[in-house]
Amino acid sequence: MLNANEIEEVIDKRGRQILETVIDRYICTVEPVGSPYLARHRRLGISPASIRSILNTLESLGFLYQPYTSAGRVPTDKGYRFYVDALMKKCQLTESEKERIRHQVKVRARDIDDILMQTTHVLGMVSKQLGVTLSPRFQQGIFQRMELLPLSEKRILLVLTIKSGLVKTVVMEIDASISEEKLQQTSRVLNERLCDLSIQEIRESLPQRVRDLARGDPRLVQFIIDSAALFFDFPQDEHLYFGGTTNIVSQPEFRDRVKLQALMNLLEEGKILGEVLSERGREGVFITIGSENIRGDMCHYSLLTTTYRVGKVEGTLGIMGPTRMRYAKMCAVVDYTAQLLGDIWGE
Amino acid sequence: MLNANEIEEVIDKRGRQILETVIDRYICTVEPVGSPYLARHRRLGISPASIRSILNTLESLGFLYQPYTSAGRVPTDKGYRFYVDALMKKCQLTESEKERIRHQVKVRARDIDDILMQTTHVLGMVSKQLGVTLSPRFQQGIFQRMELLPLSEKRILLVLTIKSGLVKTVVMEIDASISEEKLQQTSRVLNERLCDLSIQEIRESLPQRVRDLARGDPRLVQFIIDSAALFFDFPQDEHLYFGGTTNIVSQPEFRDRVKLQALMNLLEEGKILGEVLSERGREGVFITIGSENIRGDMCHYSLLTTTYRVGKVEGTLGIMGPTRMRYAKMCAVVDYTAQLLGDIWGE
DNA sequence: GGTTAGCACCCGCGCGCTGCGAGTGCCAAA
DNA sequence: TTTGGCACTCGCAGCGCGCGGGTGCTAACC
């Protein structure tokens, strides 16, 4: 973010006003903006000719470009960046918008999966872009308790609960039959040892922590140690939700079928987008615009994300769309939604 | 399905050959098929003129239509229906296709959710259509065991296992604190009473079955009875997966943006499609073509589904796409995939 | 010097015209 | 009943053209 002096150095006040107007206008109409419109629209008391010369300098600074000779101007990624950093006014959601989000998120909210799904959906709907959510990072959670339940002869259910209230179940297949009593003993002793550690700590030091167990079934303990990677390491476990494809498909930038298909690929594959999202741990709303996204084919989109908290566990949610989007509004939506999610889980 | 005589009554052999060729051709090219192509292609020893007269009768029977005067012919829904019922030869997948499906389904198959997701994805990929899967109908399952685990002061985790190996967890919030011992007692006695019943039976007769319990915590039992609808009734629980949007977006019928958007809506909303799928309990592959689908906007698509089994519990999987699709091949794909899913779960 | 009116010029877009070609229906002859 | 011939239909791609929005340049103006 630039401060006032630095901004002044780059463009003077009139330049900023014009850049802002161009961006606002282009976001609505998706058409190049020309000097006549700017002269008519803004009470700047400036003639089209003067505006043209300002547009010219804005273009030479790389904030605008002309799609072809003697067309109007279109913002560049750099232009949007300047807008976001220096020009954008903070936007508040109206009470009815907030209400709509609150309502939708709570519809049929039975478990965290439901909530995240609904949240993503409403993010998409309200923003008319694509809502994206990454499920909380389980590994940050604090171990609360584990339980081992017999399913059948050789299959055992491991139920892992995390302090924030998350519950995770894994089915184990073990090549030996173990009595129910042994199971209970084992889980009891494991619970004692692992209490209050984070999942990450457990994963890193499980063998040392449980090596010298007196009670419990040694084969089972060994099996759990061997499979620790599976139980306590959830690299792929960050589930990606997305919602609002309906909206984004109708955005004019996706007239081009190739682009649309690329987007679909990106979504369905999920891997790249998941990785990108999981690397975005920052305070506040984190915005990357177009070519600032270097991964995959993301360079045609803007991404607006923030961190939400479910107890002590963190996840990422946000909005993805064409670079042409209402950044101020989108910021507010993302921010409010993340906050709401934290509140709901607090209840 | 018509028998040989009935088929003969409707169209003679030459007519059937021509209808089949038109359909095969149209499926590849997505362009109206004309008499010159048919004369060239098939060694029928028949001139274009004769073919035209046959095409004429096929059209008057409603199997074909002309998109405009003096264009070639395009199959109607009724035409596809006749093709599927009477003309289509059973198609076998090649070993490499089977291998591909097997491989994909098992990638990262950790729990049933993963498997179904992967399955749906591969259904979409192999068919180049949209793969759709409805998760198993939990209510048909046979109760095996339940476990009550304390999460915190007033929150209890209910773990419900079903004979086929499915596991379901629900977090309960109860307005009283209950000792761990009481919990165990309660779950033990409930397990005795509910053993070997189907979830559906339990849902219908839970109060009668547990009314006169001597042991266990009465408040907890009452709470479980009161919430039986929540625990044992999973109307919305049939989760809908879909995969392969990438493919279907590139199908030429979705050039039309409105259609594409309608499709996206159908998918994302999920409700209608979910209902439609859940009503399709039939043996074998069940095919409905275009206007035969009366629900929602489904009348532009064909749906090909079958039932898969996970233990005793059934689910539905299939393929959805434009009416123009390779029905024989798609049948084989759907059939093989369902079978595979049963086998995997058997292991 | 910054601002502005005037002007020549640029270029995408929509429109109408046209010719081509694929395909048809009809008819008369085989 | 089949077939070759023929006139006709109609979508489509290509082309040319004029419109209009927008520009840059220049010369005059404050």
Image (cartoon, coloured by chain):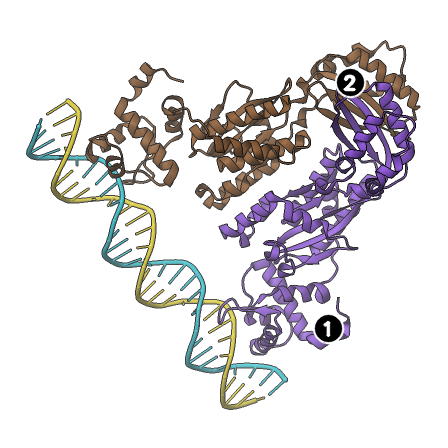
Chain colours: A brown, B purple, C yellow, D cyan
Left or right for A229, reference B243: right
Q: Is residue D4 above or below residue A180?
A: below
Q: Position of residue A58 (x, y in %)?
A: 29, 28
Dot 1 falls on which chain?
A: B
Most foreground residue, A63 or A312: A312
Left or right for A65, reference B123: left
Q: Is residue B176 above or below residue B255?
A: above
Q: Is residue A32 above or below residue B26?
A: above
Examine the rendering and report whether any part of residue A136 can be seen. Answer: yes
Question: Which quadrant would residue C9 be assigned to in this image?
Answer: top left
Residue at 70% x, 22% y is A165
**Circle 2: residue type:** Arg
Give the position of the C terminus of chain B as an image quadrant.
top right
Residue at 46% x, 30% y is A94
Q: Is residue C28 above or below residue A258?
A: below
SS class, disc 2: strand
Q: Position of residue A146 (x, y in %)?
A: 79, 20
Real-space Cα separation, disc 2 to disc 1, in angstroms: 67 Å
Dot 2 falls on which chain?
A: A
Q: Position of residue B295 (x, y in %)?
A: 63, 55
Residue at 29% x, 17% y is A9
Most foreground residue, B131 or D26: B131
* Between marks 2 and 1 in the image, the one whose residue lies nearer the viewer: 2
**Circle 1: residue type:** Ile
Circle 2: is it few (<14), some (14-19), or many (20+) Cα within 10 Å?
many
Q: Which residue is mark 2?
A: A145
Give the position of the N terminus of chain B as an image quadrant.
bottom right
Left or right for B11, reference D4: right
SS class, disc 1: helix
Q: Which residue is mark 1?
A: B7
Q: Position of residue B276 (x, y in %)?
A: 68, 51
Q: Report whether mark 2 lies on the same chain as mark 1.
A: no
